[in-house]
Image: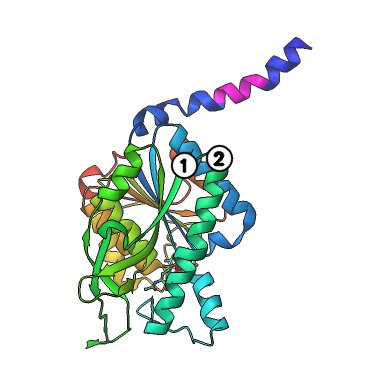
Amino acid sequence: MMSTRKHTALPKAQILVEALPWLTRHQGKTVVIKFGGNAMVDEELKAAFAQDVVFLHHAGLKPVVVHGGGPQISKALDRHGIVSEFKAGLRVTTEDAMDVVRMVLAGQVQRELVGLLNEHGPLAVGLTGEDAHTITATKHQPRIEGELVDIGRVGEITEIDTGAIEALLADGRIPVVSSIARSQDDGHVYNVNADTAAAALAAALDAETLMVLTDVEGLYEDWPSSDEVISRLTATQLEKLLPDLASGMVPKMEGCLHAVRNGVHTARVIDGRVQHSILLEIFTDEGIGTMVVPDDLEGGAQ
Ligand SMILES: Nc1ncnc2c1ncn2[C@@H]1O[C@H](COP(=O)(O)OP(=O)(O)O)[C@@H](O)[C@H]1O
Ligand SMILES: CC(=O)N[C@@H](CCC(=O)OP(=O)(O)O)C(=O)O
């Protein structure tokens, strides 16, 4: 009887011990995690995500959650009879659409994530980029085929104030940030792509890691014709690939590049459809997605 119990208990101890080098390495480090709209539509995945983030917190890391909500926004706009249109990968956001975006991100998606995290204790505090000047933006006008295009209230980040987030982290909380910015131009707000917001926050917070959860395994080498995932690439290698990337991958990979060029040690795109993908990525040998490293760390960082 006794030996059977030992038999089943030992592998559990081994798993915990395997995590020891990673626990040591990541102790006290800030990890910015972007939780994407598509991984966010499944109840079990959402609950597993909350468990992982709380686990990181209790393991001595400082997780900061930045969330998207593209599918949820599209649904709500539809209900309001507003057509969703994307240009250069960004949602064309009229004044009316902006009200809906803000309502969905800050009033629904963020509240739900805060609720899931707080099932584990008084940990999560939600805010948007508007709070305490966390994210400031100006009007973003992308260039499409050489022409500047007006896409409404979409913001380009000009400044990050990390004060509120750092105060929350120092108080042992888990900040949950919605990607809405205060405007430096007028009294209104801007809609910011959540990948871009997460990358800017990771750089400003001097985070060790930016982790972007999405609905594919990682960056595919030759999408859509192949599903070979690139497991690791340097900033310069990524920069060369950027012009060939399509749709949703563009802000993610631009964000990863921005992060590693501005002091973040590794930026990773991982599969949010896999339960506990965050723990697998942080605490095991085999990373499961795509890892971007600064040029001078080639071959070094894990
Ligand atoms: N090279 C690529 N590798 C992987 N996915 C790609 C690539 N290029 C474009 N994509 C598309 O980008 C999508 C992810 O972006 P998006 O739908 O905006 O994710 P999220 O909702 O998680 O923010 C993938 O589902 C895929 O359709
Ligand atoms: C300007 C812009 O496109 N903003 C995004 C913000 C939400 C987001 O980025 O959500 P995902 O990460 O789930 O795609 C939008 O309106 O959909």
Residue type at mark 1?
A: Leu
Measured from the top left, where is residue 230 in percent x and y? 41, 55
- As drawn, is 185 to the left or to the right of 153? left
Residue 163, visible in the rendered structure: yes
At mark 1, the secondary structure is loop
Q: Callout 2 environment at 10 Å: few (<14), some (14 to 19), or many (20+)?
A: few
Residue contact between numbered discs 1 and 2, judged by CB atoms under 8 Å: yes
Q: Image height check: is 255 above or below 19?
A: below
Q: Which mark is on residue 120?
A: 2
Measured from the top left, where is residue 285 in percent x and y? 45, 36
Measured from the top left, where is residue 40 in percent x and y? 55, 60
The residue positioned farthest toward the right in the image shown: 1
- Please report the residue visible at 29 percent of the width from the left and 49 percent of the height from the top: 164
Span highlighted in magenta in the image: 9-14
The CA distance from mark 1 to mark 2 is 8 Å
Question: Residue tagged by mark 1?
Answer: 123
- Is residue 292 found inside the magenta-colored segment of the image? no
Measured from the top left, where is residue 258 in percent x and y? 25, 58
Residue 227, visible in the rendered structure: no
- Please report the residue visible at 32 percent of the width from the left and 73 percent of the height from the top: 190
